[in-house]
Image (cartoon, rainbow, N blue to C red):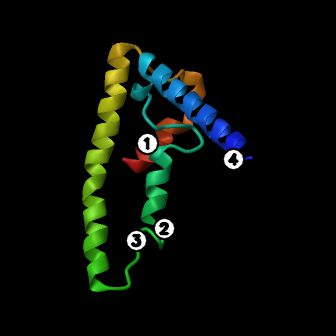
């Protein structure tokens, strides 16, 4: 039984590595994490309203919240830079896969 589990885990790791290598070969890293049903543009506002992410029970919690909020502009800039580099290299999502809602979500978020 243990041998079967190890074989399965080895095959799973092999497939994951193969997928990662193929993604690098195809410049998949330039496809930033945005998607019609749930990407950074729609998850980010939800994080701010999450009680577990923004717990405000002690004075020190406010410092943590401010630190997290201060990192948002850089995260959004990094995302934008990644998308712009993708456009330069011709690596973009198909317009049909994103839908018009993405523009609205990004506009609301940023």
Q: Are marks 1 and 3 in contact (CB under 8 Å)?
A: no
Query: Residue 9's x, y, as percent?
Result: 62, 40
Tell me the mark number nearer the camera, choosing from 1 and 3: 3
Q: Earlier in the sequence, mark 1 or mark 3?
A: 3
Please say if 66 is above or below 93: below
Residues at marks 2 and 4, CA–CA distance in whole angstroms? 41 Å
Specify the label residue 54 is tagged with.
3
Q: Secondary structure at mark 3?
A: loop
Tell me the mark number nearer the camera, choosing from 3 and 4: 4
Residue at the spot 25% in from the left edge and 64% down from the top edge: 67
Q: Are marks 3 and 2 in contact (CB under 8 Å)?
A: yes
Query: Residue 98's x, y, as percent?
Result: 55, 30
Q: Earlier in the sequence, mark 4 or mark 1?
A: 4
Q: Are marks 1 and 2 in contact (CB under 8 Å)?
A: no
8 left or right of 55? right
Q: Secondary structure at mark 2?
A: loop
Q: Are marks 4 and 1 in contact (CB under 8 Å)?
A: no
Residues at marks 4 and 1, CA–CA distance in whole angstroms? 48 Å
């Amino acid at each position: 039984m243990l041998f079967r589990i190890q074989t399965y885990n080895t095959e799973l790791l092999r497939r994951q590595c193969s997928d990662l290598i193929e993604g690098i070969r195809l410049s998949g890293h330039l496809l930033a994490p945005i998607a019609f049903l749930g990407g950074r543009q729609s998850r980010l506002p939800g994080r701010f309203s999450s009680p577990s992410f923004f717990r405000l029970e002690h004075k020190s919690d406010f410092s943590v919240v401010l630190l997290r909020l201060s990192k948002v502009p850089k995260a959004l800039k990094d995302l934008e830079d990644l998308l712009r580099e993708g456009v330069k290299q011709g690596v973009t999502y198909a317009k049909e896969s994103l839908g018009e809602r993405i523009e609205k979500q990004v506009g609301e978020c940023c």
